[in-house]
Image (spheres, rainbow, N blue to C red):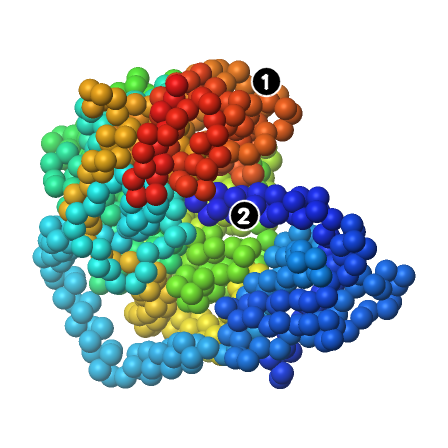
């Protein structure tokens, strides 16, 4: 969603620059500087009216809602070159102190003839100023960190940790039952963390969908979760409002319909056998809407918590309490929260599958082998149907190595029997049934998707393009997730885990050399970490990328598997691994702590302000203390303390990011909107939506109105054939796309032109006076007022009414 917004802003700035240049007004900013002592912004640049041969006589500088007017008398002329008449150097004072962080600065140059221009930097970007500040919340973070450190050192904490560990070990089944009951309670109350309200309360949602139920929430909705509230949820609601419900091909999305089987992650409800292997969508088949929405949101968290706990308990059953704490910490990690809990859903099924494979290897009875074979087949099927190769490949690689390691570690206690071989054949049959049924209905769409520019051609990525600073971005999450980033990043992309490479390597090497029970699992985890780091920083051969499928993995999508490997290593850590001579232990501990501290200060000091603008010395000190304490406690075998501090770190990172609210009770099409979109018999007519960059059309589709454009997972060939798209332009539209139409002046003297400002966006600019709406199957045209004004001039359509700001036209 943010990519679309970014592209739209670029287009706006380009049009603005073109129009001002045409009027003879030109200029740019050469430098901009903030002086904190005087609360002043210094701006140097040039501005010129080439028609009237005059310089600007006044300026207006705005930032953070404050304005500073500068008249000609305050302009200091720059006489460095022969064009000194065009140059200016101004000093803008502001009455109120400016807030810290990175702020946009708007500089407007004004001329005597009332012309003006908003100046950009030389690279045509919006200028920023960075103001350093120590925030109150950073002091609070430091105090909380010191308090946790002190509390973990008390006898009361140690006694409580021991009691809790014993309780968790004794009452495993009761705890699992309690967690399941909490899940059902939250579902019954309709509690969700979704930002669906953004989509429903937008201009198109407000005009086309009537919402019942309160919209009270804790914390703000997250715009950055656009793939969840702006893509997945409109598709879910479109399935509910389709007649009949839950189709395989939704005829309301695009003139040839959208095959819904290609939608991944938690997916959408489809009346198909493979829906059984998409448990996040089950609620829509048997629950009221409010509860079904809550089911889809809550399931990834609670089920992944139980799955990871179960897997850890199978691998190391003597650490039940620690395993629960690790599993819970893994599920509240910033990386999970920032991606709408989808990483948890992607980790759920491979963890279940690995656990089932272990149970098959341990089984001695036919009945148990058959049960776990069915379970394994189901888990693999559901894992495949998440349809996101980067997470499938990375978690699959890690857990394959873990499973191989477990088999070697336990080779003396397992034996291959006929019922286990039969179980594996049964597993293959289950996979064939679920994936086969999905493939029969979806293969054509999948093949079309595979041949797209994006994401179809993303198959031979060889890595090696991940910078050192970006790899360790997780140190920023205590600030960036809740309070935002700079313009070069966003909360989702910057989210990661809290890496501690020095102590992790020390644990692995010590465990492999001394840990007799789990040394091969540890070796598997270490091999994965080494391979992943090579992939990140050095790259791998193209033949290896193709064979291993790592060619489908961008270098910024391996965090999930890396995080899981770290938690598995902590689960396996045992007393005595790090025991050595006092002198040697102190040297290794000093190296681990100093290396980690150096890494953190390097990361946080060198990360560009455009990525992480709200940094401070207090924040850096807090992160160094957290990392130092965790490293120290692990080295001293106080794993419980390290997990506690890590849990607090993750909790503070994510608590303000999840907008807990109650799901809408009911969503129904707006009556007046549906009447305007329908014929005399009340049948909704196919509508072309002008504006909204695809989301507007998708919103109408969600209300049950068939649309021409929308969010298309693959190009709808029938549409582009009807528009007689040229062969040269096919590469532009051949992609997953937010397909938006807007009015304007097409290039090439045609009735329309296409462009793609972002890899997942296709923009069509039409000339409303010449464009043949009927030719693309449109019977209605809908637009907000800003686009409707020019549409009224077209002889191809005529206005029939409006509702809540959405204007409707009928195609002649």
Above or below residue 143? Residue 602 is above
Of helix, strand and loop, which one carries label 2?
A: helix
Q: Residue furthest front?
A: 113
Question: What residue did someone put label 2 on?
Answer: 9
Q: Earlier in the sequence, mark 1 or mark 2?
A: 2
Above or below residue 80? Residue 713 is above
Q: Position of residue 597 (x, y in %)?
A: 53, 72
Quarter of the image where the N terminus is located: top left
Q: Position of residue 453 (x, y in %)?
A: 53, 28
Of helix, strand and loop, which one carries label 1?
A: helix
Between residue 760 and residue 812, name the one nearer to us: 812
Crowd class of label 1 (few under 14; some 14 to 19; many from 20; radius 10 Å): few
Q: Which image quarter: residue 70?
A: bottom right
Q: Is 233 on the left-hand or right-hand side of 48?
A: left
Quarter of the image where the C terminus is located: top left
Q: Is 395 on the left-hand or right-hand side of 270?
A: right
Crowd class of label 2 (few under 14; some 14 to 19; many from 20; radius 10 Å): few
Q: Is 728 on the left-hand or right-hand side of 86?
A: left
Q: Position of residue 736 (x, y in %)?
A: 46, 31
What number is the disc on residue 803? none
Between residue 770 and residue 654, name the one nearer to us: 770
* Cα–Cα span, label 1 and label 2: 28 Å
Residue at coordinates 56% horizontally, 70% vertically from top-left? Answer: 67
Question: What residue did someone put label 1 on?
Answer: 727
Above or below residue 809? Residue 618 is below
Q: From where the camera sits, is residue 682 visible?
A: yes
Q: Which image quarter: residue 573?
A: bottom left
Q: Residue furthest right?
A: 82
Residue at coordinates 83% horizontally, 63% vertically from top-left? Answer: 85
């Amino acid at each position: 969603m943010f990519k679309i917004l970014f592209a739209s802003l670029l287009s706006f700035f380009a049009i603005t620059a073109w129009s001002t240049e045409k009027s003879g007004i030109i200029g740019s900013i050469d430098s901009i500087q903030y002086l904190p002592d005087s609360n002043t912004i210094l701006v140097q640049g040039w501005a010129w009216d080439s028609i009237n041969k005059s310089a600007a006589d006044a300026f207006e500088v705005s930032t953070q809602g404050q304005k500073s007017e500068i008249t000609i008398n305050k302009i200091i002329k720059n006489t460095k070159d022969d064009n000194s008449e065009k140059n200016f150097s101004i000093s803008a004072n502001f009455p109120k102190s400016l807030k810290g962080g990175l702020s946009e600065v708007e500089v407007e140059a004004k001329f005597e003839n009332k012309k003006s221009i908003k100046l950009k930097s030389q690279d045509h970007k919006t200028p920023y100023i960075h103001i350093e500040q120590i925030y109150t919340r950073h002091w609070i973070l430091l105090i909380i960190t010191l308090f946790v450190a002190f509390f973990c050192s008390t006898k009361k904490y140690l006694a409580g940790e021991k009691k809790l560990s014993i309780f968790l070990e004794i009452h495993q089944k009761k705890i699992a039952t309690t967690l399941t009951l909490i899940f059902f309670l939250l579902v019954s109350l309709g509690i969700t963390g979704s930002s669906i309200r953004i989509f429903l309360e937008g201009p198109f949602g407000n005009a086309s969908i009537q919402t019942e139920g309160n919209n009270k929430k804790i914390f703000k909705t997250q715009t950055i979760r656009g793939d969840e509230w702006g893509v997945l949820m409109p598709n879910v609601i479109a399935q509910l409002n389709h007649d009949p419900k839950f189709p395989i091909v939704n005829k309301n999305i695009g003139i040839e319909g959208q095959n819904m089987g290609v939608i991944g992650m938690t997916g959408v409800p489809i009346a198909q056998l493979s829906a059984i292997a998409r448990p996040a969508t089950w609620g829509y088949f048997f629950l009221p809407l409010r509860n079904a929405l809550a089911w889809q949101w809550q399931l990834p968290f609670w089920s992944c918590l139980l799955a990871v706990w179960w897997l850890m308990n199978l691998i190391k059953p003597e650490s039940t309490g620690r395993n629960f704490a690790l599993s819970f910490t893994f599920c509240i990690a910033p990386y999970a929260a920032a991606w709408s809990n989808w990483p948890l859903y992607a980790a759920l099924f491979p963890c279940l599958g690995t656990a089932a494979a272990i149970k098959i290897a341990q089984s001695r009875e036919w009945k148990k082998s058959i049960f776990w074979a069915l379970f394994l087949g189901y888990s693999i099927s559901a894992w495949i149907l998440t349809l996101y190769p980067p997470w499938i490949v990375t978690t699959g690689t890690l857990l394959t190595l873990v499973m191989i390691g477990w088999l070697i570690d336990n080779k003396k206690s397992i034996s291959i029997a006929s019922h286990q071989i039969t179980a594996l054949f049964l597993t293959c049959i289950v996979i064939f049934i679920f994936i086969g049924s999905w493939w029969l209905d979806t293969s054509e769409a999948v093949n079309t998707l595979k041949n797209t520019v994006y994401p179809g051609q993303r198959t031979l990525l060889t890595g090696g393009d991940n910078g050192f600073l970006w790899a360790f971005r997780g140190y920023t999450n205590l600030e960036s997730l809740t309070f935002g980033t700079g313009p070069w990043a966003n909360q989702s992309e910057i989210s990661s885990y809290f890496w501690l490479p020095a102590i992790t390597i020390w644990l692995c090497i010590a465990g492999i050399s001394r840990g007799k029970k789990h040394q091969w699992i540890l070796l598997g985890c270490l091999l994965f970490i080494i391979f992943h780091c090579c992939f990140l920083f050095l790259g791998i051969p193209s033949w290896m990328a193709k064979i291993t499928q790592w060619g489908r993995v961008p270098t910024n999508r391996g965090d999930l598997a890396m995080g899981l490997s770290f938690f598995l290593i902590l689960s396996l850590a045992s007393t005595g691994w790090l025991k050595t001579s006092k002198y040697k232990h102190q040297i290794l501990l000093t190296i681990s702590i100093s290396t980690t501290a150096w890494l953190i200060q390097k990361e946080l000091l060198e990360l560009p302000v455009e990525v992480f603008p709200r940094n401070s010395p207090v924040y850096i000190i807090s992160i160094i203390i957290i990392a130092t304490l965790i490293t120290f406690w692990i080295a001293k075998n106080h794993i419980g303390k390290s997990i506690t501090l890590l849990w607090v770190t993750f909790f503070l990172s994510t608590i303000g990011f999840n907008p807990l609210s109650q799901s809408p009770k009911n969503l129904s099409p707006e009556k007046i909107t549906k009447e305007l979109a329908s014929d005399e018999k009340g049948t909704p007519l196919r509508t072309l939506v002008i504006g909204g960059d695809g989301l507007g059309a998708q919103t109408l589709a969600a209300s049950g109105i068939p649309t021409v454009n929308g969010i298309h997972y693959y190009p709808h060939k029938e549409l582009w054939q009807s528009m007689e798209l040229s062969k040269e332009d096919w590469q532009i539209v051949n992609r997953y796309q937010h397909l938006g139409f807007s009015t304007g002046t097409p290039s090439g003297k045609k009735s329309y032109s296409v462009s793609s400002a972002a890899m997942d966006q296709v923009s069509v600019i039409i000339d409303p006076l010449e464009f043949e709406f009927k030719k693309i199957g449109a019977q209605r045209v809908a637009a907000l007022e800003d686009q409707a004004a020019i549409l009224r001039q077209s002889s191809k359509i005529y206005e029939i009414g409006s509702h809540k700001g959405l204007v409707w036209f009928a195609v002649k």
